[in-house]
Amino acid sequence: MATLEVAGLEKSFGGVRAVQGVSFAVHPGEMLALIGPNGAGKSTCFNMLNGQLRPDAGTVRLLGREITGLAPRQVWRLGVGRTFQITATFGSMTVLENVQMALLSHHRRLGGLWRPVARLDAAPARALLGRLGMADQAERPCGILAYGDLKRVELAIALANEPKLLLMDEPTAGMAPQERVALMALTAEIARESGIAVLFTEHDMDVVFSHADRILVLDRGRLIAEGAPAAVRADPNVREVYLGSGAVTGAH
Amino acid sequence: MENLLLQALSGLASASSLFLVASGLTVIFGVSRVVNFAHGSLYMLGAYLAFTLVTQLPRGHLGFWGGVVGAAIIVGLIGVVVEVLLLRRIYRAPELFQLLATFGVVLIVQDLALMTWGAQDLLGPRAPGLRGSTEILGLRFPLYELFLIGVGPVVLGLLWLLFHRTRWGTLVRAATQDREMVGALGVNQRMLFTSVFFLGSLLAGLGGALQLPRESVNLHMDLSIITEAFVVVVVGGLGSLSGAALAALLIGELHAFGILVLPKITLVLVFLVMALVLVVRPHGLLGKPEAAARGGQGSAAPLIGPAPPALRRLGLAALAVAVLLPPFLGDYALSVLTEMAILVLFAASLHLIMGPGGMASFGHAAYFGLGAYGAALAGQWLGAPMLAGLALAPLAAGIFGLVFGFFCVRLSGVYAAMLTLAFAQIAWSVAFQWVELTGGDNGILGVWPDRWAAPKLVYYYLALVLCLGATLLLRRVIHAPFGYALRAQRDSTLRAEAIGIDAFRIRWLGFGLAAAAAGIAGGLFAYAKGSVFPTYMDIPRSVDALLMVLLGGVHTLSGPIVGALALTGLQEQLVRITDYWRLVLGSIIVLLVLFFPQGLAGAARARWEARHGDA
């Protein structure tokens, strides 16, 4: 069964139809990229999947269960991890504490009034950070972290509730080229190992074509192409949308 | 029927006066985003200056009207001085700091007025040509009231012309919508702000000066008008001139007819309406959501961790003094120390909301007072012994905290602060007006501790144990998952919701917990004083709590503790040394806000870190 099934998604802002009739599915262990020029509706699409926006029409199903219109925190409880285009972490906490918060929330222990956080879920949080190569940063405040490192913290937070689905909005934006490849390779590895379905948007075509198993192309709110990287690269519609940018060839 | 008409007319006259003051406040807020507590002081100064000018100038039309206009202009200039010396330097400070600084100005002006005009009420002359009354449907109605009814619409019309037909007015409207954009377009913001302050202050001064023939001039005019003006501005929508006009009309008529229909609850009625409007329309009747500030969010709050060894030693030393010294002290010193212990808990409870919670509360005294009244009423009506009363205090405060908090924690910033203020004023009004139950202004007397706790020393130790225990519990909570969840939703609501945290629920429970803790402090205070009064939950006490937290520093729990000790000690000393303690205290507040925007503990921490390298 598909992890995520989207059917006939629609969203308008005033007179602008940001997303029109978008349908697709993501399968366990699959890396699915959602690409398109600026303003194509990628972020709108994304925000409807985890409940930040309510779609005007269409359905979103997670493992066969309808989750359309649920609040973000309910969607998260059902096993959907999320990273943001502009990172959102708790700036007054350390890297470790950020991950602990996600674990404590997952274990429903946030109501605790007595035992200090320092002693709760620290070991699994450290293990998660080690997995993402952030172990040596564990005690640093998130507020002073480099942007690339924040992206890794977000991924660690997103993985804390053992998600079935990861939604990553521009996961490598703001990172150095070398870091990008390393992060996406790691994401792909974790996804395959744990059978997590990953849906990500991305501007860097190198990242897209080297890490996506399948690609969706969105233009002006509609899906114009879908398929394996080679097929999408050759698609005349896609070439037209990106005409002149040269991005589809992977050159910079 | 005729009676209703007259009532409606006198409602219009008050609405008109209210609008003058509120329009100045809302115009200033719209451009500078400063909630100016001192606006009421400018109003009071307008009345006093008009009194002096009108009585000094030759009698007649010129003397009277010249005096009124002259007073308004002088007040406008005083507003400019305040803006240039103080507010201009703190536009980027957090809202509550600005509120605090302007409250410092309130205190200073109160004592300056006391020095200049004395404590007695002053009665001004009546307006020449408008002394008599006219007949409306066979009933007499004062001409001056009729004149006031006309002033409001005329001023509204003039302001409308000013804002829509002049270049300056266009800039003011633009700045109200998007201050940064106006700055980016190369407008001289300093001049714009200063001139807006002149206009706003002038309107306040005019409002005050025009009261001269209506009521006596006294030193309480400032706080009584500022709460009403706040209500009008918030109900109308901050920054909205037409909203202020509409709300002034609503509140003015509500007052007029409230007295007729429900004389027992006139005070509550106004705040009830304000609370209702904010619940239904969180940005007031005609207000718009504020444009989110771009950048300039300031640095993130610091991490929390175990107290540094130096602070730990200092704390233990203070504790040793608090435990060992009292047996050698007299009754007076013991009462002061008891009060200090109680206020430490009061400040710590507010800290939970403001620091980790990131919420603004401008009415925290409500829960202190509800605790005190809970204990006192249980003693008076149920004959409950002290311990039962002390157990009931946090319960009463906590329950009301949950009820009020349910509405307050949905809002943010100034609106949240104003809604907490509204609920506090509702609680205060009930205590003040429900004389049968609470004794009204006379309070409830004879709230004494049980016999075993009657000696001052024993009661001191009881208060110390309970307050210290509760404060340490709050500290424990801050370090536990719940406290972290509070900070999580403060740091990033987006991320908090994305990891399953229900931000509303966390804020709500945090608010209730803080209220319950304040209730313990209030209950202890009631038995310490032997009585409870409505003043336990009035605005100055809420401001005291804010002072303690903000002056101490909001980021660590040590801040409010230091703040509580410093403020109580300071007030205690000042009252003994000088009659003009408000002047000194106000000046200290203003200077502290100007030079230690991080608070005392924050400044000490920064110095310590600078000396010992980054933590």
Image: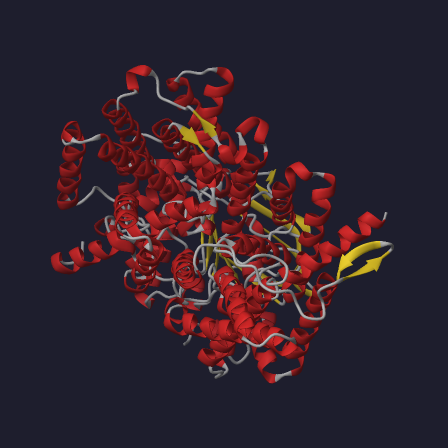
In the depicted structure, whether residue B391 falls above or below residue B370? above
| Residue B69 relative to residue B513: left or right | right
The residue positioned 59% from the left and 27% from the top of the image is B436
Residue B289: where, in percent of width, then height? 58, 60
The residue positioned 56% from the left and 42% from the top of the image is B407
Q: Quadrant of residue B451?
A: top left
In the depicted structure, whether residue A203 falls above or below residue A182? below
- Tell me, what colour scheme is on the image? secondary structure
Residue B205: where, in percent of width, then height? 54, 68
Judge whether residue B550 can be spotted in this image.
yes
Report the front residue among B472 and B147: B147
Of all residues, the one furthest to the front in this rendering is: B59
In the depicted structure, whether residue B428 falls above or below residue A153? above
Judge whether residue A75 can be spotted in this image.
no
Residue B479: where, in percent of width, then height? 30, 38
Report the front residue among B509 and A241: B509
